[in-house]
Image (cartoon, rainbow, N blue to C red):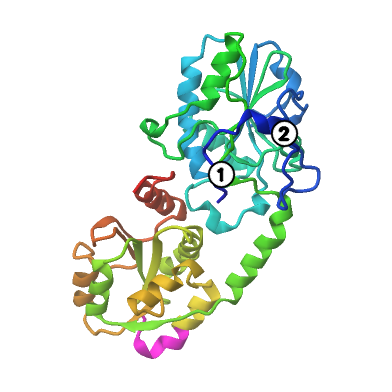
Amino acid sequence: MMTRNLLSVCLLFLTLPSIVRAEDPPGFQELQIGDRAPDFKLPGIDGRDWSLADFDGPSVLLVYFTSNHCPVCHAHDPRLMTLLEELKDESLAVVAINPNSGDGLRLEELGYSKYDDSFQDMKPYAEEHRFTFPYLYDGETQATAKRYGCLATPHVFVFDQQRNLRYRGRFDDSRYPDPATVTKQDTRDAIVALLAGRDVEVPVTRPFGCSTKWREKIASVARANDQWEQAEITLDDIDAAGVAKLVKNDTDKYRLFNVWSTTCAPCVVEFPGLIRISRRMGMRSFELITLSTDLPQDREKVIAFLDNQRAALPSRLTASLEKEGRKSNNYLYTGASMDELIEALDPQWEGPQPHTVLVAPGGEIVFRHNGLLEEEKLLEAILKKLTGAYQPE
């Protein structure tokens, strides 16, 4: 996650050379105030290609780089829609561009969204956020993002009627979704000034959000996948008292418990989705705990299944487990009584497998499901509790 200083850049810096960052890809440039808007030809979610000329006419053009996965975008996109409603009668053109290559994203970077940054996911994302403007995909070549100098999502560029750059930077100064946390509406101020024929008072600010996912990051994604494939798989024994202690959840993590066995066909079907969700949420306060009800003598069979499914522990959780005195998040239930397990985990569980519960910090069960659970529905239920945007403490 790239976080940049929220203070406005002093006008003095406009005369200084662009900063060269080691992470910038080949061909990257940083537009300066007064520069002409670079042309582009990009596919939109409406099935047609769009170019700069399609936005001729209006007095002001807003080029808004955003993405489906980023929590800061999730906070700012609704505020953009509010701003556009306020300015609906003004001479303003808007285009949103997704600069990201899905190949440059690690799975754990998607923990704030049910969407990834693929072209396919852009349409449902735009529909959910009620976009009223073209949403274009630049992830194939990222040439447009490089020409505009897109450092992060969101990143805003505002051009005058001659399509010369008059403002670049953040949308506003708050990363949180609550509009009450905003103290500076930089993009709004820039647009309103230009519509009124005035100079933009603060023409440059620093964008903050998720760093642009350049295709050059594909190698690091591959390394992360290799590390996951080679990670150690662990399995510890547990009794009903141990389960009850875990459900009590004296941590700041949400715990997803899944009861399964190698002899349960629906359990086997849904298990890969659980592992993908575990990886996806690997940078958040979340932990998947698997509870196998296989017989103790079938321990090696359980380990082999977990290894085949790559039921590893996200590296970020290692320290928290050590603090709790635990070594694994995969458990084999050793008790004879299933009633004791039910009472310890979820008294509303009637017994059939698989059974899944989400436990909030403090021990409250905030979601439960018995039977086969689709990955998409489970992810949506989790994100409703953990939220898809940053929240203040």
Crowd rating for badge 2 (residues with CA inside 10 Å; few <14, some 14–19, many 20+): many
> Can residue 77 be seen in the rendering of this structure?
yes
Residue 341 place in picture, x, y as percent: 23, 75
Q: Is residue 219 above or below residue 157?
A: below
Residue 180 placement: quadrant: top left
Which residue carries the number 1 mark? 4
- Extreme residue toward the bottom, this view: 297
Report the amino acid beneath label 1. Arg
Main secondary structure of the magenta stretch: helix
Q: Which label belongs to residue 148?
A: 2
Residue 157 place in picture, x, y as percent: 64, 28
Q: Earlier in the sequence, mark 2 or mark 1?
A: 1
What range of the chain is rendered magenta? Answer: 294-301
Residues 162 and 256: in front is 162
Residue 225 place in picture, x, y as percent: 62, 66
Residue beneath the point at 53% across and 20% down: 189
Residue beneath the point at 69% across and 18% down: 55
* Element marked by disc 2: helix
Residue 23 inside the magenta-drawn segment = no
Report the amino acid beneath label 2. Tyr
Residue beneath the point at 65% across and 11% down: 59
The answer to whether residue 302 is left or right of residue 43 is left
Crowd rating for badge 1 (residues with CA inside 10 Å; few <14, some 14–19, many 20+): few
Residue beneath the point at 40% across and 61% down: 286
